[in-house]
Amino acid sequence: MTIAARDYERAVAAAVSKSYLARFPAAARDALLSRSTRIEVPARGVFFRSGEAPRTALLISGLGRIAVVNESGDDLTVLWAHAGEWIGAATVVDPARPVFVGFFAQAVTDLVYLDIPASVVAELAHADAKVAWVVAQFLASRLDQAIAEIVGYAQGDLRSRIVRRLLELAVHQPVGAPLVASITQEELAKAVGAARPSVARVLAVLKREGLIRSVRGGLLITQPDQLTVPARTGAA
């Protein structure tokens, strides 16, 4: 997981340029970065849970997910977080407001993120209207993403439904284990509400694209970052 110093600096610059932090005034952005902490998380490690102190995180490398778990223990991914994703900004606006019960952030692959205290972002937002406006814009975009995610779950095409199901199964593999979705084609067809031949055609396309391959016990997700691009919208 270790990144060479020069490569890390480039990765940080690239992540910032993709994020809403790029819209901050330069002085405010530099102040945030100077007060942030680099954190490395192994694949499948959980790096935030509801009930913990408010903070935000900027993903530098790797793939993460934001999910919620219900009373029965089942969880649902609401955001696939790629490099450049800024997580936890909602805690900036109202730190006293409890985060949704059951909310957690988990590394899908090994990842690196910058831990940015929500209190620091709030301090800058109170002092500079431009910073506050960017935070407002970011939260508005999250609302749009949440709506898109609901529509995706309800009306997504077959490929999207299959990808979602494979990912949700694979992320429950133990820490250090490959991302394998343990499911047969017949089970997958039932899960996504489609005929087996239709599912087989979509899987064949995903294999040709190099995104998955068949292994003993199921389907190995070989490029999770690329596979999640169509399903990356959500709310956090």
Image (cartoon, rainbow, N blue to C red):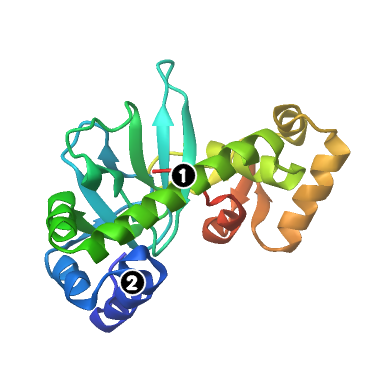
Residue placed furthest toward the front: 129
| Marking on residue 200 | none
User: Can you give x and y, in whole percent of width and height, for residue 119 in the image?
Assistant: 13, 50
User: Can you give x and y, in whole percent of width and height, for residue 98 in the image?
Assistant: 24, 30
User: Is tag 1's residue or tag 2's residue first in the polypeptide sequence?
Assistant: 2
Residue kind at label 1, given as amino acid type: Leu
Question: In the image shown, does 146 or 197 lie closer to the viewer?
Answer: 146
Q: As drawn, is 102 to the left or to the right of 210?
A: left
Q: Quadrant of the C terminus?
A: top left
Q: Is residue 60 above or below residue 50?
A: below
User: Can you give x and y, in whole percent of width and height, for residue 183 in the image?
Assistant: 65, 34
Query: For numbered disc 1, what is the local secondary structure?
Result: helix
Q: Which residue is mark 1?
A: 143
Residue displayed at 75% across by 36% down: 185
User: Badge 2: few (under 14), some or many (20 or more) residues near its Cα, within 10 Å?
Assistant: some
Residue placed furthest toward the right: 197
Residue displayed at 49% across by 49% down: 178
Residue displayed at 35% across by 58% down: 111
State the image quarter where residue 3 is shown: bottom left
Q: Is residue 151 above or below residue 61?
A: above
One can see residue 104 in this view:
yes
Question: In the image shown, does 221 or 50 lie closer to the viewer?
Answer: 50
Q: Which residue is mark 2?
A: 22
**Disc 1 and disc 2: Cα gap in Å?**
20 Å
User: Can you give x and y, in whole percent of width and height, for residue 165 in the image?
Assistant: 62, 37
Residue displayed at 34% across by 27% down: 102
Q: As drawn, is 95 to the left or to the right of 212?
A: left
Query: For numbered disc 2, what is the local secondary structure?
Result: helix
Q: Quadrant of the N terminus?
A: bottom left
State the image quarter where residue 84 is shown: bottom left
